[in-house]
Amino acid sequence: MNTATANINSLTDKPFHYCPGCTHGIAHRLVAEALDEMDLRGKAIGIASVGCSVFAYEYFNCDMQQAAHGRAPAVATGIKRVLPDRFVFTYQGDGDLASIGTSEVVHAANRGENITVVFINNAVYGMTGGQMAPTTLLGQNTTTTPMGRDRLVHGYPLPLSEMLAALPGVGYLARVSLHSPARVRQAKVAMSKAFSCQIQRKGFSLVEILSTCPTNWGLDPVSALRFVEDKMTKQFPLQVFKDFDQEVNE
Amino acid sequence: MPKFGLMKGNEAIAEAALRAGCRAYFGYPITPQNEIPSYMAANMGLHGGAFVQAESEVAAINMVYGAAGAGVRTMTSSSSPGISLKQEGLSYIACAEVPCVIVNMMRSGPGLGGILPAQGDYFQATKGGGHGDYRLMVLAPSTVQEAVDLTYTSFALADKYRNPVMILGDGLLGQMMEPVTLPEPISDLPSKPWATTGCQGGTPRIINSLYIEADAMETRLHHLYRKYSQMQREEVRFELYQTQDAEVLITAYGSTARIAKTAVDRARSNGIPVGLFRPITLYPFPTEQLHGICTHVERVLCVEMSMGQMVEDVRLAVNGACPVQFFGRAGGAVPSPSEITAQIESMWAEVNAQKEVNR
């Protein structure tokens, strides 16, 4: 169990501001562990986005640039094009990436930009107080879908990873979850794989992480994990969509 | 590329940028500036730089933010509707203090407007443009040679102040061909220890515009405004033409100023003591310098290719020292020398009538 408490160089000592039961902290840890293990911290530039993870630049112990809502993949493109030997990643939520930033992520992926996107999908706008996200489940209550998300009024949960999987510029693409220790370990493998994809210049890489938001879901932390397992994984099946060194579709 | 040649305004700006050390360009097609991205696409690679045709103006300015944040001299260009789309990014860039150069070859507006030259983006360029308290430095060339010189200088100014600098031209300047002498390619670039290039063994750097606590945000704003004050003291540029004995003074910038010069010459040949005050920096505006001249002229005429925007800064500068009138053509229409001369003659008649009354 030593590894769970080991010092992580790629995280600062600043305490996370995230709510109890939120899995952002685990996701940060996975990114940081992968940076440490692959010795990337010194050549990494991270892009913080807008939303609950806006303060990511205070938590990741590497060079960081904060981006406007949804624009992180464009900022990452600018950096990577002038510093192709550095490691460039973005950390974005579902509102940021799948709503206001759809254009930026789709075109970065389609250009095959050698960047890595960490995509936190918790089916809700967290920081602004629980509004409907593009990934909100049908029937899910949010402050802007008080009667539940209705497909006839609000449309369907957006399957962003499935959409990106169609693009030849994508080298690695996986959807993982953090609702159990076994899934956390799988998520770690996916993170390392995505990072490798960038290092080997195999194109755009993205890890979609199904994450919890107990505060805005109105659930206790354990029930929130159960919601991910029982509800979210039905809408957003866990899978490796693309893997640069083997054609996988499981 | 010869050092001397006949060049189109847009291409001359692109070449001057490369000679100034610009090694990243991100843009999106829009008329009348398309020669800039085409030139960059053809030539940036020869210099080992980065060129990306972005999916949108919004993406282009954010790519600028990223590349310039990584310490590379970076440029984008567009025209009026496209510049509107870049305003979000410019606000972030100004607050985060990332140096870059933006070219706006203005066309008529509002809305989709038209593709013919206009100067209707003066307010947007000089008063901030995006949200929050900030300013761009704004340079307004009136010839292709001056566009070359100011483009070359703009990268140094952007680095000096860690602030976005806008080259504000219009479709006339972008499309016309004139002889130019190109500057020598720059060899020494300033170091940028603040840039996010990977911290290696050092302390991580953060480029950011989020200041969630009021005190911190206000401190940041005071810091930005100290830079703007320094620009006012050190960077004001303007041209005086035939102003020594002028009793009527034209104010005009960019393409309009060169038309006004012809009008001044014609009116002078008819014996009217008229001169031209041409702001080159629109921000910082040459407020004190214009006021100084207006203490000994009788009338000021501000000429623009707009419905009247710079005239507001002219009135603030003149500050009641003499009457200020406005003449503008807009929507893509260009004022002719004879139209401006007619305005000068009418004002000169007013000045003489006033002299009669005072006698």
Image (spheres, coloured by chain):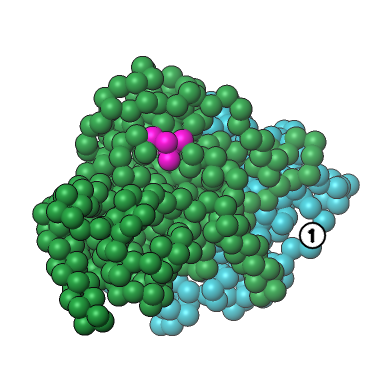
Chain colours: A cyan, B green
Furthest residue in direction top, as rendered: B2
User: How many numbered tags mark residues here?
Assistant: 1
Residue B151 on the magenta segment: yes
Q: Is residue A130 above or below residue B271?
A: below
The amino acid type of the residue labelled 1 equals: Lys
Vertical position of residue B42 compared to residue B306: above or below = above
Foreground residue, A222 or B1?
A: B1
Provide residue B3's location: percent of width, then percent of height. 38, 20
Up the image or down, B118 lies above or below B356; here it is: above
Quadrant of residue B328 within the rendered picture: bottom left
Q: Residues within 10 Å of mark 1 (few under 14, many from 20)?
A: few
Nearest the viewer among A147 and B203 is B203
At a point 61% along the width and 67% down the height, the residue shown is B221
Is most of the magenta stretch helix, strand or loop? helix
Question: In the image, B76: left or right of A27?
Answer: left
Horizontal and vertical percent for residue B76? 41, 42
Where does the image place residue B40, in percent across and percent down from the top left? Answer: 37, 30
Residue at 30% x, 70% y is B298
Determine which residue is flagged by label 1.
Answer: A14
Q: Secondary structure at mark 1?
A: loop
| Magenta stretch, residue numbers | B148-152
In the depicted view, which residue is nearer to us: A148 or A38? Answer: A38
Chain ID at mark 1: A
**Residue A194's spot in the image, x, y percent?**
58, 37
Which residue appears farthest toward the front when viewing the image? B359
Q: Is residue B189 visible?
A: yes
Q: Is residue B308 left or right of residue A3?
A: left
Quarter residue B290 falls in: bottom left
At 54% from the left and 45% from the top, the residue drawn is B157
